[in-house]
Every structure is written in structure tokens, then in C-alpha cells.
Amino acid sequence: MRVEPILLKHKRYNYLPTQFLWRGVAHQVHKIERVWSARGWYRKPPRNYFRVRCHDNQVLNIFQDVRLNAWYVER
């Protein structure tokens, strides 16, 4: 699995991602298809995951490293 950093630009309700920048391209979230959390275990920080469908119909899993408040795309 490959993980790349993204820059989260906007959130709804201060939680749900609505727009992010990945590889220099802005992606607008059209729909959040799934939300789940993973507890940190053995050196892994806790994460909030979002399966999002973008306006270009691309489906991506993005997640937030809760400790660092850093965002990533996982492919």
C-alpha cells in the first residue's frame, strides 16, 4: 500500500474533508462513501479514514493522522 501526503484545504463540520490538494491538483469531494477509525497500535498513531468520491469520479481512501493532524492519501 502506498501513502502520500495531501494538503487538506476545507472541511465540513470541522471534521469531514471537502477539498484537498494532491500532487499539485485540487480535488473536490463529491461524496463521502465510508468513514471509519483505526486505533493506534504498536507505534502506529490513531487514524480517521474516509473513502471519498471526487468530482472526477475517482475513489480514494484518505486518512488523518490524529496525533499530527496530518492528512494522507492511501492507494
Image: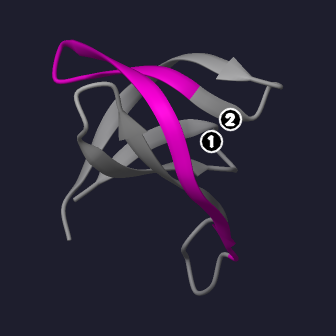
| Residue segment shown in magenta | 18-39
- Estimate how packed mark 2 is, as few (under 14), some (14 to 19) or many (20 or more) residues with alpha carbons within 10 Å: few
Q: Is residue 5 magenta?
A: no
Find residue 10 and report its horizontal and vertical position in percent: 59, 14
Camera-side residue of 31 and 75: 31
Inspect the image, locate mark 1, and give the three-letter code of the amino acid beneath it.
Leu
Find residue 38 and report its horizontal and vertical position in percent: 64, 74
Q: Quadrant of residue 49?
A: bottom right
**Which color mode does the image show?**
one colour
Q: Any mark on residue 68, and which?
A: 1
Q: Is residue 68 left or right of residue 58?
A: right
Q: Any mark on residue 56, and which?
A: none
Inspect the image, locate mark 2, and give the three-letter code of the amino acid beneath it.
Leu
At horizontal 35% and vertical 32% (from top left) the residue drawn is 54
At horizontal 80% and vertical 25% (from top left) the residue drawn is 14
Front position among marks 1 and 2: 2
Disc nearer the start of the sequence (1/2): 2
Find residue 34 and report its horizontal and vertical position in percent: 57, 60
Q: Quadrant of residue 16?
A: top right
At horizontal 33% and vertical 25% (from top left) the residue drawn is 55
Quarter of the image for the C terminus: give it: bottom left
Find residue 60 and report its horizontal and vertical position in percent: 32, 49
Position of 29 relative to 21 (above/below)? below
